[in-house]
Structures are given as structure tokens and as C-alpha cells.
């Protein structure tokens, strides 16, 4: 009988913002595609993009699966990111996104799907305080599982520690967590952030056992209110600094 060799590392390419490319279960995956150059996105609240992608969309290569946490905000899906979706065989997102975008498969919370040998589970996320959905819209996270691979949690734009605790209870373990951090705040809910800040990220890390924490989506947009340096300091003070792996943008690294 052949013994399965378990991989505990993940090779990732952080393109910028929430956009990460990685290989998993024989496929190439991409989170929340954002490839536009700097500019403004008018709307009920205008978003200001400050930096472009570390790798242009023309150089990203073939993508098999996109994990789209939500489609309604340009810092998670911009103009070039939307165009990319049409070239990808499988795109998972919320059921609401599937109603707005052709070719998107919407998953409800805790719903599962298969991509080859990989099980994808949509997990709940909250883009702000309780009751924020009429303003921020519905968002989702994902958990990936496959034999011989680390179990990976992709948070999407989630600000709720309680939901992560619920996710952790549903899975035997989480090995690697890609967390959107940066204390995103556009002023809609006063001082309440719409993504994890350093303090809540620490609480999330504590909820996830020994998981390696890969923080992303903390730079490149004007609405982020905390730096990665601050995140590192808070994790160090909490005794969790050895669990952090900050991926440099534009470089393929193992975490």
C-alpha cells in the first residue's frame, strides 16, 4: 500500500491586496482578483487604490479556480479582475454574486463542492459589525481540503472572530490561514472595522490552534488603517509572532 505523504507548506504568490495565487491539489487557485493600476472607484463610498499589482494580469499565467469572497467592492474585484473571470473554468463565490455574474457558482455557508481531489467548503464571513449585510453585502470565506495537502482557510473580508471560532470547530484542524487584515475602515460604521485589525487577528489566530497565519489585504488602498508592522508588533506582544508569515508581494514563497 502506498503511503500518502502529507504536505504542510503552501507556495504562494502575493500579487497585492487580497489577490494571492497558489497551487493546491494539482490546480492553480487565485483569490479575489485585483489587477488594475492605481485610481479611484466612485460609488456610495469612493475607494482609492494607491498601488498597482506586483504582477500584471498578462503575466499571471493560467488559473483553474478563483475564490471570490464577494463581487461588490472594487478592492476585491476590479475591472481587470472581472475580465479575468471569463477566462477561468471555475469561480466560487456567494449566491448573490452568482446572480450578478455569469459563470460564477454560488455557494451558501457550509456548502461543499469538488475540484478534482479538492473539497471546497464555503464558510461564513461578516464584512463589518452584526447586521452589516444590507450595507456591505454578503461575503464568504473558503476552506480547502485534500489528501496530502494542508487544510487552508481563506478568510475573505471577514471581521468576525466569533465566526472563525465556529469555523475552527467544524474542521479537524486548519494548517494555513490566509487572513485579510489591515483594519479596513471607510467610516460607514464609525470606528468599527470591516476587516480584521491586529487585535482581532490575534484572537482569530488563537482560535485556529497552531495554524500558520498569512496576512494579506493590508496595503495598497487608502481605507486600510493599520500597517503590517503594527500587526507584527501586536502578534509579538501576544507571543504569536512565530506563527506569522508575511508574503512579500511579487515573489513566490513557501509558507
Image: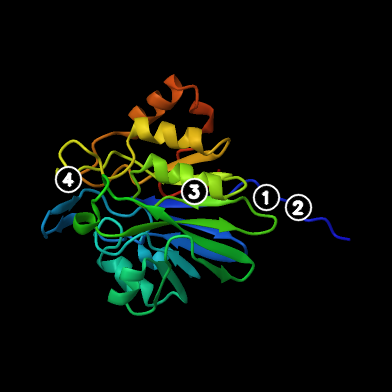
Position of residue 191 in the picture relative to residue 114 (left or right) = left
Residue 28 rendering spot, x and y as whole percentages: 53, 64
State which tag comes first along the sequence, 2 or 3: 2
Residue 202 rendering spot, x and y as whole percentages: 42, 31
Label 4 with label 3: CB-CB less than 8 Å: no
Cα distance in 3D space between marks 1 and 4: 39 Å
State which tag comes first along the sequence, 1 or 4: 1
Residue 41 location, quadrant: bottom left
Cα distance in 3D space between marks 4 and 2: 45 Å
Position of residue 222 in the picture relative to residue 82 (left or right) = left
**Which quadrant, please, contains the N terminus?**
bottom right
Q: Specify the label residue 7 is tagged with.
A: 1
**Which quadrant, please, contains the C terminus?**
top right
10 Å crowding of disc 2: few (<14), some (14-19), many (20+): few
State which tag comes first along the sequence, 4 or 3: 3
Q: Is residue 214 above or below residue 170?
A: above
Q: Which label sits in the foreground, 2 or 3?
A: 3
Cα distance in 3D space between marks 2 and 3: 26 Å
Q: Which residue is mark 3?
A: 167
What residue do we see at 57% from left, 70% from top? 115
Q: Residue furthest bottom?
A: 102
Q: Residue furthest right?
A: 1
Residue 232 rendering spot, x and y as whole percentages: 41, 28
Residue 158 rendering spot, x and y as whole percentages: 35, 48
Mark 4: secondary structure = loop
Q: Which label sits in the foreground, 4 or 2?
A: 4
Q: Specify the label residue 5 is tagged with.
A: 2
Label 2 with label 3: CB-CB less than 8 Å: no
Can residue 252 be seen?
no
Q: Which label sits in the foreground, 3 or 1?
A: 3
Amino acid at each position: 500500500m502506498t503511503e500518502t505523504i502529507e504536505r504542510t507548506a503552501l507556495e504562494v504568490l502575493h500579487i497585492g491586496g487580497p489577490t494571492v495565487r497558489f497551487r493546491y491539489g494539482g490546480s492553480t487557485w487565485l483569490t479575489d482578483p485585483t489587477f488594475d493600476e492605481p485610481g479611484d472607484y466612485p460609488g456610495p463610498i469612493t475607494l482609492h487604490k494607491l498601488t498597482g499589482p506586483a504582477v500584471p494580469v498578462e503575466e499571471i499565467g493560467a488559473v483553474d479556480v478563483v475564490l471570490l469572497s464577494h463581487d461588490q467592492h472594487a478592492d476585491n474585484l476590479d475591472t481587470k479582475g472581472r475580465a479575468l473571470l471569463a477566462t477561468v473554468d471555475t469561480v466560487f463565490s456567494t449566491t448573490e454574486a452568482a446572480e450578478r455574474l455569469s459563470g460564477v457558482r454560488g455557494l451558501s455557508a457550509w456548502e461543499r463542492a469538488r475540484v478534482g481531489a479538492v473539497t471546497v467548503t464555503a464558510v461564513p464571513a461578516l464584512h463589518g459589525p452584526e447586521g452589516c449585510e444590507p450595507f456591505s453585502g454578503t461575503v464568504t470565506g473558503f476552506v480547502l481540503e485534500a489528501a496530502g495537502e494542508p487544510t487552508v482557510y481563506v478568510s475573505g473580508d471577514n471581521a468576525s472572530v466569533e465566526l472563525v471560532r465556529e469555523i475552527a470547530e467544524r474542521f479537524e484542524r486548519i494548517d494555513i490561514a490566509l487572513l485579510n487584515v489591515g483594519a479596513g475602515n471607510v467610516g460607514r460604521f464609525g470606528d468599527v472595522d470591516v476587516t480584521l485589525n491586529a487585535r482581532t487577528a490575534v484572537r482569530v489566530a488563537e482560535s485556529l490552534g497552531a495554524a500558520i497565519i498569512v496576512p494579506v489585504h493590508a496595503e495598497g488602498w487608502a481605507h486600510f488603517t493599520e500597517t503590517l508592522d503594527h500587526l507584527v508588533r501586536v502578534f509579538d506582544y501576544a507571543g504569536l509572532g512565530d506563527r506569522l508569515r508575511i508574503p512579500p508581494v511579487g515573489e513566490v514563497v513557501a509558507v
